[in-house]
Amino acid sequence: MEPLVPGVPRPIPQGDAGRLGSGPALGPRGISTAHSVVEPTATAKGVALTLVALYALITLVPLVWILLTSIKSPPDSISYPPKVLFTPSIEGYCNLFTTRSRQTPEYIASLPPPDDACEESARRNSMVVVSRSNYVPRFVNSLIIAIGSTLLSVGLGVMAAYAFSRFKVPGKDDLMFFILSTRMMPPIAVAIPIYLMYRELGLSDTKLGMILLYSAVNVSLAVWLLKGFIDEIPREYEEAAMIDGYTRLQAFFKVVLPQAATGIVATAIFCLIFAWNEYAFAVLLTSGEAQTAPPFIPIIIGEGGQDWPAVAAGTMLFLIPILVFTVLLRKHLLRGITFGAVRK
């Protein structure tokens, strides 16, 4: 072994050099400078966090503005420049749920004391509450139509997807493309034919007609999404169940459906969002009995024009059910979106 000389590094033997060459890279102080190709660097994490925070901020600004508008008074909601600091008011929510009429000061003075805050707010503006508005019935219509169409489209979609996934269907690829093509078509392209057909069948302005229409639009999306989920479920599970004495239908309900629960929930969320927010068909095919909230909210008129606080209040309340539904099932939604992304 050669003697060590101060300031001169010790030569590395040939065998040791080969072993060190295959190990982690060492810095000048012997600290490893190698990093994982999967784990992002601190800079990449910082950039990603900044972009996500910026996107979240841009996305939330309209919602925050709608919320602020819903608690403004009508003059504050149309002031220019827009008011950021203002006195909160419940007048928008009162106008949303009630119909008011202007009266003379003498008539208002002859009335008994107001029963609630909305009546008191109306009398301060020389008005009285005469009836309840149609917002609640329209909101209930949205619930019935959205939930009914979601259940029907997901139910039909999971059965069709199972058939396409497990059986040899003649022309399967062509049928799948045809089913998906119905989703590509813009609603306005078939609005007039559907209107004429519904008028002849007596389905115009009916909840059943809207449920059937939304189900027909959503079933294509449900079939395509659910087929991907069912394809990921091994066939061996069903074969083992049928060997144990289960029928094909029993294996479907007791084996496939529990395994596909994540995909069913994710599909149901997408179908519900479409049916909940749909506007074009609701405007054309409904006018009173089956009218939903989306076409009703924009036509809320106050004294002197559009009642923007009431419109904003109706929009905020309309967002709550779909927001709660999505938050409660967010784990299934995230799992459903990434399901099958990693192959085993």
Image (tube, grey):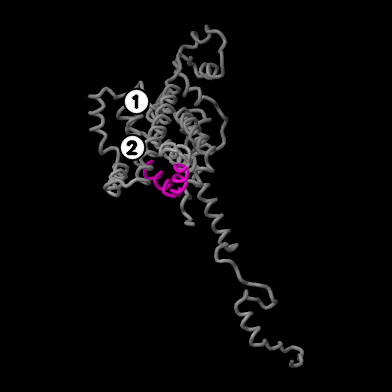
Q: Looking at the picture, which amino acid does disc 2 mark?
A: Val
The one nearer the camera, 230 or 281, is: 230
Q: Position of residue 344 (x, y in %)?
A: 49, 57
Magenta stretch: includes residue 293: no
Q: Residue at x 65, y 76 (%)?
A: 26
Q: Is residue 178 above or below residue 21?
A: above
Q: Earlier in the sequence, mark 2 or mark 1?
A: 1
How crowded pointer 2 is (Cα within 10 Å; few <14, some 14-19, many 20+) is rated as many
Q: Position of residue 340 (x, y in %)?
A: 46, 52
Magenta stretch: includes residue 239: yes
Name, please, the residue furthest toward the bottom: 2
Residue 7's quadrant in the figure?
bottom right
Provide the residue designation for mark 1: 208
Q: Residue at x 63, y 72 (%)?
A: 33
Q: Residue at x 74, y 93 (%)?
A: 2
Our reading of the magenta stretch's main secondary structure is helix
- Residue 217: assigned label: 2
Q: Position of residue 89 (x, y in %)?
A: 55, 27
The quadrant in which the N terminus is found is bottom right
Q: Looking at the picture, which amino acid does disc 1 mark?
A: Leu
Residue 273's quadrant in the figure?
top left
Residues shaded magenta: 222-243
